[in-house]
Amino acid sequence: MKINEETKVRNQGEISLITTIPKTYVKALKIESGDTLEWILDTETERLELNIIRS
């Protein structure tokens, strides 16, 4: 199954940005408070992979 969502990105201070995880993903992936997201960026393809590390 493929789920597509879009979220806005906004400034958080001078050196970082912030976004939210869509509720659809939170429910489908059973993401809970305390879980960690590992961000893997491929700069050649400009693709971002997120891995969920359960607490």
Image (cartoon, grey):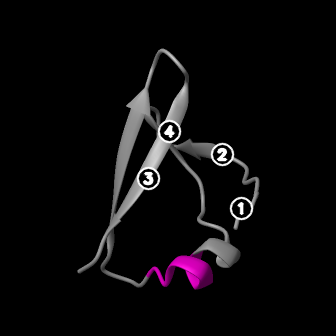
User: Could you say where residue 52 lies in the image, as x and y percent from the top left?
Assistant: 36, 66
Does the CB distance between marks 2 and 4 fall below 8 Å?
no
Work out whether mark 2 precedes mark 1 in sequence or the reverse, and give the earlier one.
1
Q: Residue at x 45, y 19 (%)?
A: 43
User: Could you say where residue 42 lies in the image, as x and y percent from the top left?
Assistant: 43, 26
**Disc sitting over residue 9 in the figure:** 2
> Quick one: which residue is furthest to the front in this view?
1
Q: Residue at x 66, y 45 (%)?
A: 9
Work out whether mark 2 precedes mark 3 in sequence or the reverse, and give the earlier one.
2
**Residue at the disc numbered 4:** 48
Q: CA distance from mark 2 to mark 4?
A: 14 Å
**Residue at the disc numbered 3:** 50
Q: Residues within 10 Å of mark 4 (few under 14, many from 20)?
A: few
Q: CA distance from mark 4 to mark 3?
A: 7 Å
Residue range (magenta): 26-31
Give left or right: position of 45 versus 37: right
Q: Residue at x 60, y 80 (%)?
A: 28
